[in-house]
Image (cartoon, rainbow, N blue to C red):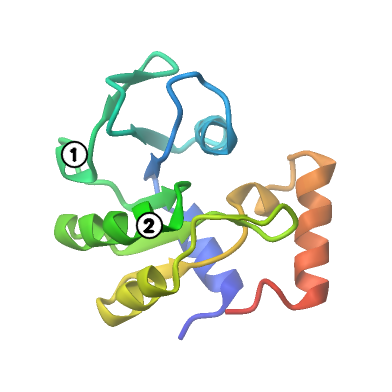
Amino acid sequence: MSTMPELVSDFLAQKRIAVVGVSRSGSGTANGIYQRLKATGHEVVAVNPNADTVEGDPCFHRLQDIPQAVDAVMIVTTPDVTDQVVRDCHEAGIKRVWMHCSVMHGVRSTSDAAVQFCRDNGIAVIPTGCPMMFDGNVDVFHKFMHWWMRRSGKLAL
């Protein structure tokens, strides 16, 4: 099994990343991640079953609706929705998944069943943290969260 730094490096090296759970309102954690990935040069695709556009960009209802393949999926949903999203990833041939989890705020997308599904089906999975914790140019809160989670062992897989 790969280490957390290897998984993060591989995930963030991908060019085309879908963010599942973006909001039509343009606010929230998923939208923050969506905007940050765009700002760091990724081609980002919005996924929300209830939206046709997000932040002026096309939004797809399911991963299978995206016309060109994506390399990775960032999941920012409730754990029960995550269970279906990882099955959609498998069906779409997507091999990298990150399930957002804010240990400090208790908000998580991670589901034990979804993590196990990924591992059983050859999908590299990051079941904790936030990609913004690994961006050196991000806010002090995410820098602190990265330090605290590493120090407390919560970034271990």
- Which quadrant would residue 29 be assigned to in this image? top right
Query: Who's the residue at 80% across and 75% down the image?
Result: 152
Question: Mark 2 belongs to which amino acid?
Answer: Asp
Q: Residue at x 76, y 67 (%)?
A: 149
Task: From the viewer's side, name the closer residue of 89 and 70.
Answer: 89
Q: Label 1 amino acid?
A: Gln
Instruction: Find disc 1 in the rendering and name its residue.
Output: 68
Q: What element carries label 1?
A: loop
Q: Given the current orientation, which residue lies at the most extreme top position?
A: 56
Placement of 119 over or under 27, stated as above or below: below
Image location of residue 100, percent across then percent down: 54, 54
Is 16 placed above or below 127 here? above
SS at mark 2 in the image:
helix
Q: Residue at x 32, y 70 (%)?
A: 123
Residue at the spot 43% in from the left edge and 21% down from the top edge? 24
Q: Label 2 neighbourhood size at 10 Å, few (<14), some (14-19), many (20+)?
A: few
Q: Are marks 1 and 2 in contact (CB under 8 Å)?
A: no
Residue pointed to by mark 2: 80
